[in-house]
Amino acid sequence: MVHNEKHHYYDYDEDDYDEDEGEGEESELFLTGFIENQSIINSYENQSFGDAWIKNEIRNKVEIKYGKDFFYFFMVNNLYLNIDITEPGLNKKYEYSEDTQLSRNLRLSNSNFEINFNELYINYQTEKFRIRAGNQIYGWGTADVINPTSYFNPIDFREFIFKDDDEMKFGVPSVSGMFFGDNCTVEVVFVPVHVPIEISSYNSFWAVENDDALYSVFIENSDGLPVEVKNFGFGFRVSLSYNGADISLSGYHGPDKEPVHLPVGLFVKPNEPVYVRVEPEYHIIDMVGLDFSKTLGSFVVQFEVAFSPNKNGFVRQNLIDTENIKFPFEAGESSYISYATGFNYFIPVNRLFPEHEGDAVFTLEWSQQKYFENDLYPPTFSDIFTLRLEDSFYNSQIKTSLSGIIDVKNSGFLLWPKLEYDFLNGFSIELSYASISGKHEDENELVSLFYYYKDNDIVLWKIKYEY
């Protein structure tokens, strides 16, 4: 969530469009991509090499655009292979899925292999409108980290937040239309198939666990809501520029991309702690949202908010009185608001150091979510400060960043320094370290997500070749 990887979109530019010229031109093929090796090692002490080595992954990403300016086919394909370099069968800390499965958006995966097509669509456009059909990702919203008005694309939580930006969201099978006015655009979206989020299996490195208590957590995944008319998703977004500001108004009706994770019972495995079994429950939701951004000198300020009259959460129980806890927990409905606000500050470093050639940017964002009903547990990921300082040196061959995420309410944080070197011949290397901390101060309240990963500090490196 706090990455800043480049992702190429072939968006329509009205100024470049010539309908007569487009109809006579020949179809062209554009192909780009990269192959990357990513490795993750857990830095927790007192463990063997095999236990510390979490993932050794080969990723091949291909982007293809074929056709004419007004009518083309576009695909983004990712192929992943997790290679176990420790003793065979020893490292089972990372799996794409427990069993071989084909998801509704054509993602095929098993324990060591995955191929996905998060963008796979046909595009047709004229001077006045654009239509796309197929797997799509919708970049709605202006915030850098958390986008309350990003209604459609579910999040991939199988590595907590340590996936690149272009991997965090699953594409959804959908039809979209964008209509161009003189000073505004209108986009409408129809999603007939619900695609759920994905989380780690209970025995993997990124599983949500609670080793300090008498119980741990087993969270199941879902196949999604049935393909029925009542579960279709619909949305619209009206965007305009006014007085130097970009403003959008949006609305949505359909499956909530954030399920209610309901505790439904207990189960015990030999020589293991008691597990609380948690099932995701999806509900239909209505939302309206507003996003705003404006450049003020060296600052770009951003604000984004979404409101729902019928968001679901799960009803409070006394977690200290374990004898009277009732399973399954119940879901309840409430009005709900989510917002994110912040800025990007482009630091004029060259005023102090004239020889500095890179771009220094400081990003700060505050996000909060709230149920209006007090009998529901508060949202898990709320009251979050995100900070990031980025700079580049040596003709942008060296890129550095320091990111931090602070859970103000539940006393958790993530600190993540990163260093990248670009050889300018297609090859680049990246090294980073992530330190995670969290506390559990109130036994009757839910804890920060960072608390569950407090022993998951990692060293991460990548070797990439772009073609």
Image: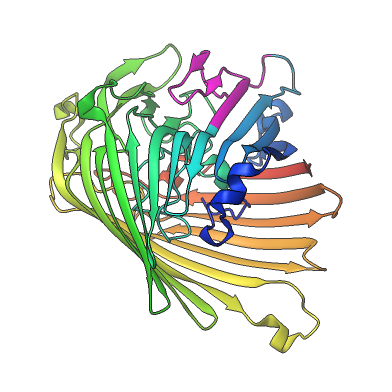
Position of 439 relative to 320 (above/below): below
Residue at image point 70% right, 62% down = 400
Q: Quadrant of the C terminus?
A: top right
Position of 58 relative to 108 (above/below): below
Where residue 331 appears, as percent x and y from the top left, is 17, 34
Q: Is residue 122 left or right of residue 331?
A: right
Where residue 137 appears, as percent x and y from the top left, is 47, 42
Where residue 241 appears, as percent x and y from the top left, is 39, 70
Residue at image point 40% right, 22% down = 273
Q: Is residue 120 left or right of residue 441?
A: right
Q: Work out whether residue 159 or residue 110 is closer to the camera in this orientation and state it.
A: 110
Q: Is residue 94 within the magenta segment?
A: yes
Where residue 293 appears, as percent x and y from the top left, is 41, 69
Residue 427 showing in the rendered view: yes
Report the span colored magenta.
Answer: 89-117
Residue lying furthest bottom in this view? 351
Quarter of the image where one finds residue 397 = bottom right
Q: Work out whether residue 276 or residue 58 is closer to the camera in this orientation and state it.
A: 58
Residue at image point 85% right, 54% down = 423
